[in-house]
Image (tube, helix red, strand yellow):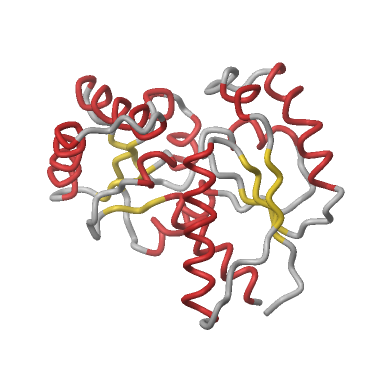
């Protein structure tokens, strides 16, 4: 085990709990016994951040800057952020800590599978903005987008999971959509809420899972 220090930024309660549970599970699988993942949880007031998402803004940067200044005091070697969308703003803050970045990890995973085209599932903002699309295109990876009604379904699932209001009918419709796309394409899950209740399918690349797996590798060096 390494001397690396991990800081997890606490944001939405369900997504943060999901990451913590997954980190502990992956760490225990690797090291056995009663092992749990050594980390520092820096919990912040997600309301102040979430009300300014999803688009990057000076106001959002102003909220985040003191958060990361506080994180610096922990002398972390790695920082894990359980919110995919937030990385777009964080990219512009020039944070010295090593961010375990979901976009970079996903590009590497896509290349490892020698894929030239993927479908992105996320919030409506994520699916329609240029942040992920441009990052993928820069590596010659084309992005396919669901149609408007499918985007609405995916975003409804995202919101329901966040609010703990998902229903069997809603999830069945979503899982059917996943199966349909997975027949011909690889699906990129670019939203933590979608990772929490993801469909079991080998044609899915989950950004949150990539973050978690990479974190355990870094802590194991």
Q: Nearer the viewer, residue 159 or 179?
A: 159
Give the residue at x 33% y 37%: 121
Relative side of 51 to 186, left or right: right
Q: As displayed, is residue 31 above or below residue 109? A: below
Give the residue at x 31% y 30%: 165
Query: Residue 198: x and y, percent?
Result: 30, 48
Quadrant position of the N terminus in the picture: bottom right
Relative side of 48 to 144, left or right: right
Query: Residue 5: x and y, percent?
Result: 74, 63
Query: Residue 110: x and y, percent?
Result: 39, 56
Q: Nearer the viewer, residue 72 or 58?
A: 72
Q: Residue farthest to the front?
A: 34
Give the residue at x 47% y 67%: 25
Q: How many marks?
A: 0
Q: Nearer the viewer, residue 194 or 133?
A: 194
Residue 142 lies in quadrant = top left
Relative side of 1 to 75, left or right: left
Quadrant position of the C terminus in the picture: bottom right
Query: Residue 111: x and y, percent?
Result: 41, 59
Q: As displayed, is residue 157 above or below residue 195? A: above
């Amino acid at each position: 085990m390494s001397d690396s220090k991990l800081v997890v930024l606490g944001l939405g309660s369900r997504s943060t709990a999901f990451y913590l549970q997954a980190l502990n599970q992956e760490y225990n699988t690797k090291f056995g016994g009663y092992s749990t993942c050594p980390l520092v949880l820096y919990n912040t007031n997600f309301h102040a951040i979430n009300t300014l998402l999803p688009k990057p803004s000076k106001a959002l940067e102003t909220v985040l800057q003191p958060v990361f200044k506080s994180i610096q005091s922990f002398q972390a070697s790695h920082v894990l952020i359980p919110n995919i969308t937030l990385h777009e703003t964080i990219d512009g803050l020039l944070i010295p800590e090593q961010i375990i970045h979901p976009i970079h990890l996903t590009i590497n995973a896509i290349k490892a599978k020698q894929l030239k085209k993927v479908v992105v599932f996320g919030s409506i903002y994520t699916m329609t903005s240029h942040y992920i699309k441009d990052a993928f295109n820069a590596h010659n990876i084309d992005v396919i987008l669901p149609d408007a009604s499918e985007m609405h379904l995916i975003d409804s699932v995202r919101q329901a999971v966040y609010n703990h209001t998902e229903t069997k009918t809603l999830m069945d419709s979503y899982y059917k959509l996943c199966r349909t796309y997975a027949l011909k394409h690889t699906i990129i899950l670019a939203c933590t809420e979608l990772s929490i209740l993801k469909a079991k399918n080998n044609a899915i690349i989950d950004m949150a899972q990539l973050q978690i797996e990479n974190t355990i590798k870094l802590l194991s060096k």
